[in-house]
Every structure is written in C-alpha cells, then in structure tokens.
C-alpha cells in the first residue's frame, strides 16, 4: 500500500483537481482521475522524499476562514490607501523572526503573507530564521510582527508539527 | 432577478478591485510598494470575478460549475512566488541581499 500510494493526500488532491478541471463528476472522470492520482505521485516520488505531515484539519479550516476574512478586510484598507495618496503611507521593511522550521511550512507562511494585502514577503536569510517582509504602511513594527505571529504562524505551527 | 443582482455585484466589485490594484501599480512611490498591486488584484479582484462566473454558469449553464475554484487555487499558489522572486531580485540589485546572512540586514 505504502509503495503503491506513497502520498495519499497528493493522490486525493490530484483526483479532486482532475474532477474540477473536467467540471463533471462522471464515472469515467473519476476513473481517469484515480489513475492520474496513482501514477503521478509514483513518477514524481523522488522529488518528495518526505511526506508532509498534517495535523488538525480543524485548524486548517479555521485558518482558511481567517485568511478569507483578512483578505477582504485588508483589500479595503489598501484600496483606500491607494485612492487617497495624500494620506501619508510609510512603506518599510520588517524583519520577522521565524519560529517555523519546516521548509514546507515556511513556504506556506510566506505565501500567506504575500496574499494578505499590505504585506509582501521579500527575502529569507540563509539559515531560514529571519523573513524580510515589505509592508505598505508601517506604523508599529512590533505590533505588525505580533499580529502576523498570532494570526498565521501559530496556526501553522499546529498544522505542521516538527 | 436576484441572481443577476448578485452576479453584477461580484463582477463590478471584482473589477473595481482589479482597477484599484492597477492604479496602485502605476502610482505608488517605489518598486516594493508597487509590488503590492499585482498580489492584491489577484486576490479580491480575480476572486470576485470568479465567484460571479461560478454563480452564472451554475444557474444558466448545465449544472454546478466549480472549475473557477481551480483558477483561484493556482493563482493563490503562483502569485506569491512571482512576487517573492521579483522582490528578491530587486533587493539583489540594490545590493541589500547577498548570499550570506549579513545581506538581509539594513
């Protein structure tokens, strides 16, 4: 079983992606999607030496909900900042001390930061301890870091236990 | 009637955010601020348009239409990566970022 399905999560995701692509849930598409789900992980196995472990599916849902809400809210903030340029923006860089150690978790974290408007992840130092974040409006660096840590890094630490 | 209102709301909302994102791309003062534009327009701007598309084709096409979710998913995966690489390249050009740890300091 382990040899046939080295990455069960990836297989399930490929099947779902195939069904979404086809936009149709017929028996033929389920079969074809399952074949893809079995063979693609088999052939690409050597690119994924270790399988990412996911814990707490509830936290994933919670994080997705929060991300959605934050994206909508922050879009309005940034839109008003763009439309009223006389209101002074103070863009700047923030050094964010990373607590996450898992490579995959750091990737997800950096992507989340870029997706929430107002912040873009810009660089990661060589030993993966500091993430350089560019923020559109920095008023209080420590508050920004605390907010990101609380709303995104903590949940990710629970989802990807090291 | 109500479905058309809903679809119109999402299309106009999405388009407005895409427009504002583009204005930001053109008008913000420096490169790094401008970088915020593209990552934003893809989140709410494209998101709104895709929700409208999904609602429209679910109601007027044949059956539930969900492959818009896939577009959103791929955008959410690729947009941060390209933004990150652009920022990294810009830092590199400014000489702020080298291969070693000292690079990240400013």
Image (cartoon, coloured by chain):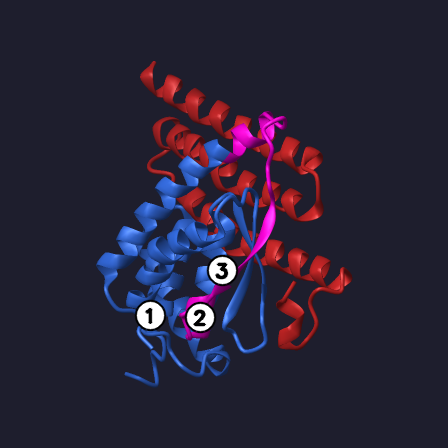
Chain colours: A blue, B red
Q: Which of A66 and B62 is in front in this view?
A: A66
Label 3 to label 2: alpha-carbon separation: 10 Å
Residue A24 visible in the shown view? no
Q: Name the element at disc 2.
A: helix
Residue A69 appears in which quarter of the rendering?
A: top left
Q: Do labels 3 and 1 share a chain?
A: yes
**What is the x, y in percent for residue A2?**
30, 84
Q: Residues within 10 Å of mark 1 (few under 14, many from 20)?
A: some
Residue A5 appears in which quarter of the rendering?
A: bottom left
Q: Give the range drawn in magenta.
A: A78-106
Q: Which residue lies furthest to the bottom in this view?
A: A3
Q: Do the residues labelled 2 and 1 touch (CB within 8 Å)?
A: yes
Residue A132 marker: none
Label 3 to label 1: alpha-carbon separation: 14 Å
Q: Nearer the viewer, residue A74 or B43?
A: A74
Q: In which quarter of the image is the C terminus of chain B?
A: bottom right
**What is the x, y in percent for residue B81?**
57, 58
Q: Which chain carries label 2?
A: A
Residue A160 marker: 1
Q: Is residue B17 above or below residue A122?
A: above
Q: Which of B15 and A43 is in front in this view?
A: B15
Q: Residue at x 45, y 38 (%)?
A: A74
Residue B79 left/right relative to A65 = right
Q: Residues within 10 Å of mark 3 (few under 14, many from 20)?
A: many
**What is the x, y in percent for residue B66?**
38, 42
Disc 2 designates what residue? A104
Disc 3 designates what residue? A110
Q: Is residue B71 above or below residue B15?
A: below
């Amino acid at each position: 079983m382990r040899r046939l399905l080295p990455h069960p999560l990836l297989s399930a995701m490929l099947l779902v992606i195939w069904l979404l692509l086809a936009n149709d849930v017929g028996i033929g598409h389920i079969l074809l999607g399952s074949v893809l789900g079995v063979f693609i992980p088999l052939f690409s196995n050597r690119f994924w030496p270790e399988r990412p472990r996911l814990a707490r599916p509830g936290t994933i849902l919670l994080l997705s909900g929060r991300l959605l809400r934050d994206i909508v809210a922050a879009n309005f903030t940034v839109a008003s900042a763009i439309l009223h340029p006389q209101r002074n923006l103070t863009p700047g860089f923030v050094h964010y001390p990373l607590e996450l150690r898992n490579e995959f978790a750091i990737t997800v974290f950096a992507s989340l930061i870029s997706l929430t408007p107002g912040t873009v992840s810009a660089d990661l130092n060589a030993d993966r301890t500091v993430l350089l974040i560019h923020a559109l409006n920095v008023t209080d660096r420590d508050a920004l870091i605390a907010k990101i840590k609380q709303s995104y890094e903590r949940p990710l630490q629970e989802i990807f236990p090291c | 009637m109500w479905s058309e209102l809903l679809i119109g709301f999402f299309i106009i909302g999405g388009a407005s955010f895409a427009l504002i994102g583009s204005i930001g791309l053109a008008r913000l003062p420096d490169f790094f601020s401008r970088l915020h534009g593209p990552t934003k327009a893809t989140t709410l701007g494209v998101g709104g348009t895709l929700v409208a598309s999904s609602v429209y084709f679910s109601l007027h096409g044949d059956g539930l239409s969900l492959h818009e979710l896939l577009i959103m998913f791929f955008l959410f995966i690729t947009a941060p990566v390209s933004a990150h690489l652009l920022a990294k390249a810009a830092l590199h050009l400014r000489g702020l970022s080298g291969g070693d740890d000292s690079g990240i300091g400013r």
